[in-house]
Image: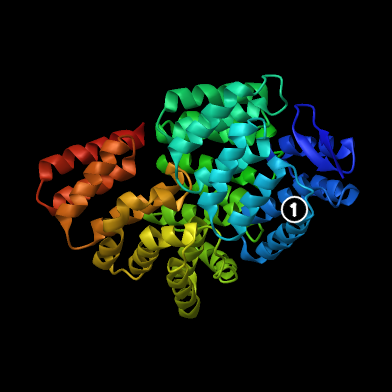
């Protein structure tokens, strides 16, 4: 095995120059959520089964699935690269990737992220390390690092690089998650101009419209670009989910259920965990908004019952739990809660997050479904400012905040409920749901005049 360089100077240990170019060609497939990613990687491994970076990428992609049943494949890839490393067949960058995969397989997601960032200091054009760090910063709820990781890399990438447009959208997403919505939208729109099929960048702008409460614009933005972004893998369903968020805020529940039945809720039993995250979080929101979701929970609970012992991302497991506490059997719920207890005792990145916030949130969710509202508040209120590390976006984690406010509104402490809805209406002043619930809570504490004004605000938003 010798070294060959791709067109931007990154060296690969490979059997031929074609392998280095083949790996380079996979990067835009990966960043673009294209459906043929694993097919292309399989073809590269068939042609060059001993290429370290191709084997490492397969291990990474298995870990990204978030599914426990794919973890053994990642471990197998790591073992193969262990053998290559022992034989001295890895260059410096490949050794660092080998280290990162080993850390991730051992549950040290923080360590893997640090290693990818170290790679980028020396090899800023390593797009695989860049995208993986983007992923794990995201699933650590770390908006500043999502932003700053991209800010460090972007100036070093040539604008004619085939993946440059993806980086613009990734930086835009980092800006959005760290609160710079104007800058985020500017970069996201520029990325979509470069490549309308860049679903992540379409999604970055969709997040801006969600966070700045512009549902009509969000519906138009996602709908107008649908012919382009609908060509990608199951990530396309997440954009339909975003459109559902806009409709739910407008009280258009029939439109949301139509999107659920015909788009993001129709094919949820897949290895793509985001499908279940989309479906469960939307059904929970719909019920909080007063919509009837029929028997849709049961399908999700049946799937969740097969994923009780997944332990890659606590964010994902909490969404499986949503389905179980909504329609699952008591045995499945007990098994999931026991698994979370055990997970919280592990000295891993996700274990520590589960211990700090995930377990409380899970217990609160269960008590909320059992209508033990004060117990639910007692579990969730103390960790409300510890939820960011659970991962996901601000928009995705908002369902957890909504659970807390919903439990408080139904519980026995009306003063706390008023305070929480005061926070929410300040943070989301264009949410009719927030103002309507705020009005109910104000009535409970005898503040009829303020309740009337809140009710009028809710009515005006709904009519608008």
Q: For the N terminus, which image quadrant?
A: top right
- What residue is drawn where x is 34% and y is 64%? 364
Expressed as whole percent of the image width and height from the top left, the position of residue 326 reads: 45, 67
Could you tell me residue 296's position as x and y percent? 53, 62
Q: Say whether residue 124 is left or right of residue 378.
A: right
Residue at (63% x, 35% y) in the render: 199
Q: Of 321 and 337, which appears nearest the observer?
A: 337
Residue 133 against residue 446 in the figure, above or below: above
Observer-nearest residue: 41 or 325?
41
- Give the residue drawn at x 58%, y 70%: 302
Which residue is at a point 37% across and 58% down the rendered structure image? 357
Residue 240 visible? The answer is: no
Q: Please identify the quarter of the rendering in which residue 367 is found.
A: bottom left
Can see residue 192? yes
Could you say which quadrant of the image residue 83 lies in?
Answer: bottom right
Report the residue that reaches farthest toward the left. Answer: 446
Quarter placement of the C terminus:
top left
Residue 192 image offset from top left, x and y in percent: 62, 25
- The extreme bottom residue here reads 331
Residue nearest the observer in this picture, 133 or 391: 133
Residue 297 position (above or below residue 46): below
Direction top: furthest residue: 159
* Front position in the image: 59 or 361: 59
| Residue neighbourhood size for the residue with mark 1, other residues' Cα within 10 Å, grouped as few (<14), some (14–19), many (≥20) | some
Q: Position of residue 8 (x, y in %)?
A: 75, 26
Instruction: Label 1: state its secondary structure.
Output: helix
Question: Is 384 left, or right, of 211 in this rendering?
Answer: left
Up-down relation of residue 85 to residue 340 (above or below): above
The colour scheme used here is rainbow
* Count of numbered circles in the view: 1
Residue bearing the label numbered 1:
85
């Amino acid at each position: 095995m010798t070294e060959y360089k791709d067109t931007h100077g990154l060296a690969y240990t490979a059997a031929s120059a074609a392998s280095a170019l083949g790996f380079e060609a996979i990067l835009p497939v990966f960043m673009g959520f294209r459906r043929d990613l694993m097919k292309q990687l399989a073809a590269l491994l068939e042609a060059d089964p001993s290429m370290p970076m191709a084997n490492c990428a397969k291990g990474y992609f298995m870990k990204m699935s978030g599914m426990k049943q794919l973890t053994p494949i990642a471990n197998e890839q790591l073992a193969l690269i262990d053998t290559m490393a022992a034989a001295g067949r890895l260059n410096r960058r490949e050794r660092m990737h080998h280290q990162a995969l080993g850390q991730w397989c051992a549950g040290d997601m923080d360590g893997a992220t640090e290693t990818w960032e170290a790679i980028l200091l020396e090899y800023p054009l390593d797009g695989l390390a860049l995208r993986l760090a983007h992923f794990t910063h995201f699933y650590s709820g770390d908006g500043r690092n999502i932003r700053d990781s991209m800010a460090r890399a972007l100036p070093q990438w040539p604008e004619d690089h085939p993946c440059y447009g993806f980086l613009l959208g990734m930086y835009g997403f980092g800006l959005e998650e760290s609160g710079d919505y104007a800058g985020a939208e500017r970069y996201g729109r520029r990325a979509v101009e470069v490549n309308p099929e860049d679903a992540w960048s379409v999604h970055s702008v969709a997040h801006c419209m969600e966070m700045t409460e512009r549902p009509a614009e969000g519906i138009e933005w996602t709908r107008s670009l649908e012919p382009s972004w609908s060509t990608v893998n199951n990530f396309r369903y997440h954009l339909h989910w975003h459109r559902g968020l806009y409709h739910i805020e407008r009280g258009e529940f029939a439109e949301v259920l139509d999107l659920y039945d015909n788009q993001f809720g129709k094919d949820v039993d897949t290895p793509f965990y985001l499908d279940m995250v989309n479906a469960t979080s939307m059904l929970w929101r719909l019920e909080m908004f007063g919509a009837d979701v029929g028997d849709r929970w049961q399908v999700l609970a049946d799937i969740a019952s097969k994923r009780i012992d997944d332990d890659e991302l606590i964010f994902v497991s909490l969404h499986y739990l949503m389905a179980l506490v909504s329609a699952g059997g008591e045995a499945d719920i007990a098994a999931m809660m026991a698994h979370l207890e055990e997970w919280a005792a592990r000295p891993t990145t996700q274990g520590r997050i589960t211990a700090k916030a995930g377990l409380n949130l899970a217990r609160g969710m269960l008590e909320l479904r059992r209508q033990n509202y004060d117990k639910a508040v007692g579990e969730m209120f103390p960790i409300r400012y510890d939820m960011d590390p659970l991962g996901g976006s601000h928009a995705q984690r908002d369902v957890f905040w909504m659970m807390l406010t919903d439990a408080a509104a139904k519980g026995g402490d009306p003063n706390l409920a008023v305070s929480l809805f005061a926070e929410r209406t300040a943070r989301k002043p264009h949410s009719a749901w927030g103002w309507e619930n705020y009005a109910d809570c104000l009535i409970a504490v005898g503040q009829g005049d303020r309740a009337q004004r809140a009710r009028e605000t809710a009515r005006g938003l709904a009519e608008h």
